Amino acid sequence: MDTDRWRRRRAWARVAAVAVLTVAAVYVVRVLDLAVAVQRAERVEAELATEVTVMAAEVAVLQTAAAEAQSDAAVERWAREQRGLARDGDRPLVVVAPSPPPGSGPGGDASATDLWSRLREWLARRRR
């Protein structure tokens, strides 16, 4: 009977050892999962910090540009350069591009037409 009791104790000891090892394995897996999650969160935090820094610099540039755009000098420069407006008494000068010489447009020159026809003939010969 003592051997029977000893066998049962030994079986329960094995069951307990398996249970403890299983719990330990689950705990180790959970700790490793948390470590990976922490590393991922730190990487995302660094990326977002960089993005915030870039955006803060962009905001500063835009605020400076907005303040400058509201000045009278900037408004006047915009009106003159972009809209072609002038003050009373100003005599604006409008620059006009020179007109192209006659025959320089598409199909306007006989030599250009001749060049195209020669090119078409050459391509037709190459296809054969």
Image (tube, rainbow, N blue to C red):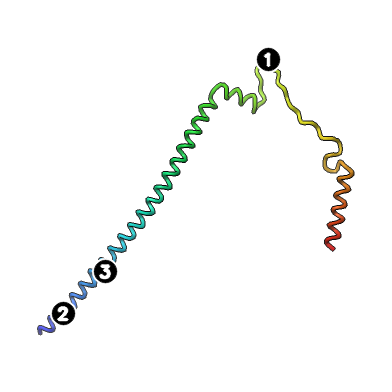
Q: Secondary structure at mark 3?
A: helix
Toward the top, the furthest residue is 89
Which kind of residue does numbered mark 2 sit on?
A: Arg
Residue 51's spot in the image, x, y percent? 45, 43
**Image position, residue 56 (x, y; %):** 45, 37
Quick one: 88 or 62, which is closer to the camera?
A: 62
Closest to the camera, between mark 1 and mark 2, is 1
Q: Amino acid at mark 3?
A: Thr
Q: Which residue is labeled 2 in the image?
A: 8
Residue at 86% over, 45% down: 112
66 relative to 92 in the view: left or right:
left
Q: Earlier in the sequence, mark 2 or mark 3?
A: 2
Please name the residue that numbered disc 3 is placed on.
Answer: 22
Q: Which class describes the residues within 10 Å of circle 1: few (<14), some (14-19), or many (20+)?
A: few
Q: Quick one: label 2, few (<14), some, or many (20+) residues within 10 Å?
A: few
Residue located 85% across and 53% down the image: 119
Other residues around mark 3 within 10 Å, as few (<14) / some (14–19) / many (≥20): few
Alpha carbon of mark 2 to alpha carbon of mark 3: how far?
Answer: 21 Å
